[in-house]
Amino acid sequence: MLFVHHFPSSAKKFFQNENFAALLVPPLLILLPAVHSQCIKDQQQSLLHLKKSLQFDQSSCRTPLISWNSSTDCCSWVGVTCTSNGHVVGLDLSRETISGPISGSFANFSNLRVLNLSSNTISGTVPGFFVKFSKLTSLNLSGCSLSGTFPNEIFQVPTLQTIDLSANFKLGGSLPEFPKKIGSLQSLSLSETNFSGSLPDSIGNLKMLSTIDLSNCSFHGSIPSSLFSLPLLSQLNLSHNQFSGELAFSNVSSNLVTLDLSFNNFEGQISVSIFNFRGLQSLNLSSNNFSAFPFNGPQQLKNLTNIDLSYNSLLSLYNGTDSSYSSFPQIDSLNLAANKLGTIPYFLRNQSTLSSVDLSENHIRGKIPHWIWSFDQLSNLNLSCNYLVTLEAPLLDSKVKTVDLHSNQLHGQIPTFLPSAIYLDYSRNNFNSIPSNIGDFLTNTLFFSLSSNNLHGLIPASICIYASNLQILNLSNNSLSGMIPQCLTAMRDLSVLNLARNNLTGSVSNIEVTEDSSLQILEIGGNQLRGKVPKSLAKCTILEVLNIGNNNITDSFPCLLKNISTLRVLILRSNNFYGGTECLNTNGTWSELQIIDLAHNNFSGEIQGILWRTWQKMMDTKNGSLLKTVPTKRNVGSHTKRKLSLVALESPEATNALSCNRLGGPSCRDNSNAISPLEYSVSVIVTSKGFEMELVKILSIFTLIDFSSNNFSGPIPKGMGELKSLRVLNLSRNAFTGEIPSSFGNMRVLESLDLSQNKLSGHIPPQLVKLTYLASLNLSYNQLIGRIPTGNQFSTFPNDSFTGNKGLSGYPLTVDNKAGFPPPPTVNGRPPNSGHHREVNWDLIIVEIGFTFGFGVAVGSLVLCKRWSKWYYKAMYNILLKIFPQLEERIGIHRRHVYINQRWWRR
């Protein structure tokens, strides 16, 4: 019996039962005092044998099971629990860096009541000998690397009270039928596994079940009604599965506290019977296809505090009387995002405990009511992605902490009644002016975005004078003019400054950065700035993104940036940069660089190897796969945090989750109701596959080099083929000479290659055929020769990819290389002479044979037959005289020669 101390008398009776004592999960086992009795010798030997049979991760810095040695009592060893008579009944080996399969030596401990192997890197399948553990009450194998099919018989071990197999992504199986007499199971967790199939109706026989977590699995079908009637059920999570049908609840458990059925395929109306769960506190039905919810029913749920109905098809809410609204329960959190609501729910007016409201991505029009700002507890309000046009007066100071109004139709002056807000997103509206004293109202603000409005005028200096806590400031895509306030870049805590795509003027050289700068992202591209790259940028030792493209900057290559090892994106395009790109006396590297865009400048000279040989991010073969991290099932768009790690999308339209988040600010789709004030989406415009596109976020696997439209010369370095993770390479419109390096065939994930309008010569390397991801190729207007390689992607490239190379031939060019002619005609999709047998055109051949035969007979007769020759000559002579009579006079003097010839003919 385990010793239990300091428990109330009512609880001691519970814990004195050995089965329930063994149920205590591992964290509690560690806290329980060890039993001071000598463990049985054979038990000690079995444990030492078990330790010897286990495999451990050799890379770990810790020594696993160091206390397990023969000189001490095994009941005192870490992770070992004994009964009073020295029998081992509990093993907690969690986080012991165990690797390899589950050792067969565990079979020697068939009397175990608690076994915890969680958070190891155990591989292989789950052995069937656990079925013989007739006293086992708790089995925890969560967070391992188990695979295969889990033995169904283990679920039916009659003593088991808790089973946790969660976070084993490759472990599959299904739930068996449960007999009526197997009522011990209290907690079942299979979340984030590959379990599938339908839930058996016999799950209702598990009368002791209080917690069920089957989230992130592959279960399907309808949910058996017996599950909802379990008398002790308090936590039920079936989210992220494929359950379907309509929901109806009868004979339900009144003890259910949390119900999560999100991310399934339920549809239709939500039945009022859901309010039979009288103890319900949290209800999550998001991401289904429900069309209606009975909002006149929640008043029956006195304990309900959290409601999440987001991402459904709810058209409208119940419009009842004021009395029905007053009886609506006081809730803390309401999420109705991404439905089809046309108005703000009126019942919210009578709420006093609301802390979070999300009504984003609906069809709400008109005014934002002034009463919505008056809640004392309200912390988060998200009304983004609607059709709201104005804020209803009066606007009294509000205590709301995070406010997201982006992607509406709000207009006028930027509102200044939220002095407590730490997060303000007003982007993608129609605001036209910024108050000069705006900084006075941003003293607590960390995130402030006004991007994509119609803002004119100067950037108020009050922002950097009074808004000293700002970490993220986004004023991009407006019509702001004047100079960049010097104090702006000098703000110590500012991590992101985005002023791109405005009408800002002045010298960029005036930008001053402090020694302790926190700047990680600086975007000032798309303005009218001049001067040279500020030398103070060298102080930005943690800078990740620098975009100064599309300005009037005149300078040499900014070698001062080479010492910034964190740089990931460098945009210098469309300026007046000149000279070479070689940086002498610089030891810095750009090992994290993903995007470098030098296009449309005046750079010249050869590309030196030192420029790109340190770009490890583009050489990393791990990034050669489409994704280097395994996503969880139906992963919802998570946000980038303070570190501002750059995540990935290829275009703004790549995901609906970011459809209203193209220019900074949070995604509308978020798992949590709270919005972190430290989120930011990097927006970079690049040219890929011949099109200009905007990257809203920068995927860790997206890599690009664009040196187009410069004066680079010399050969293309063969070593560029080492950039095996490169996605886009554009060297067009330069003066490169020599051959295309065959090493380019090593860039297996390359999607776009543009080498057009250079002076490249030689053959097209056949190794390029290996680039199966290549979707865009342009080799036009060079001096290439030979036949175009065939196979894989090359058969899909158009004529324009090769035109302007006089020495090239082969498909899609014509044989004589006259660009612009269509490919040869086809018969049933194939060339006329394709295949192993050539068809014979007998009509043509008969005509040719007839002509040849007739010509041969005529000529042969003239040569071999004298009579035929004489007749032929006289006939032709007479015909000519009839046509031309004057010939008689001219050829009279020659008649004698004719007679002589006639006499010769007679011989």
Image (spheres, rainbow, N blue to C red):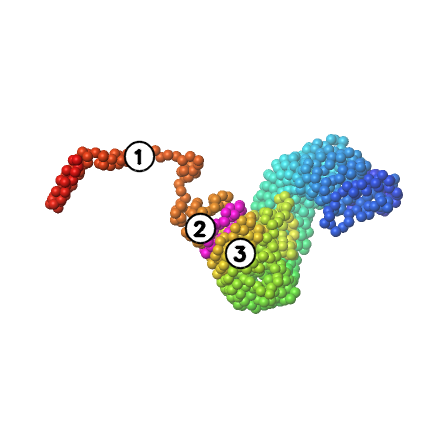
- For label 2, the SS is strand
**Tag shown at residue 717:** 3
Residue 679's quadrant in the figure? Answer: bottom right
Report if the CB atoms under discs 2 and 1 are less than 8 Å apart. Answer: no
Q: Is residue 482 above or below residue 868?
A: below
The answer to which of 180 and 628 lies nearer the viewer is 628
Q: Amino acid at mark 1?
A: Ile
Task: Please provide the residue range marked out in magenta.
Answer: 751-780
Dot 1 surroundings within 10 Å: few (below 14), some, or many (20 or more)? few
Dot 2 surroundings within 10 Å: few (below 14), some, or many (20 or more)? some
First along the sequence among labels 2 and 1: 2
Query: Quarter of the image containing the N terminus?
Result: top right
The residue that mark 1 highlights is 849
The residue that mark 2 highlights is 785
- For label 1, the SS is helix
Residue 650 rendering spot, x and y as whole percentages: 55, 50
Whole-number angstrom distance, CA of label 2 to CA of label 1: 40 Å
Residue 686 rendering spot, x and y as whole percentages: 52, 55
Residue sitting farthest toward the front:
907
Residue 834's quadrant in the figure? Answer: top left
Instruction: Please indicate, yes or no, whether residue 830 appears anywhere in the rendered image.
Output: yes
First along the sequence among labels 3 and 2: 3
Q: Residue at the spot x=19%, y=36% of the render?
A: 869
Instruction: Please indicate, yes or no, whether residue 363 appears anywhere in the rendered image.
Output: no
**Tag shown at residue 774:** none
Residue 749 rendering spot, x and y as whole percentages: 56, 48
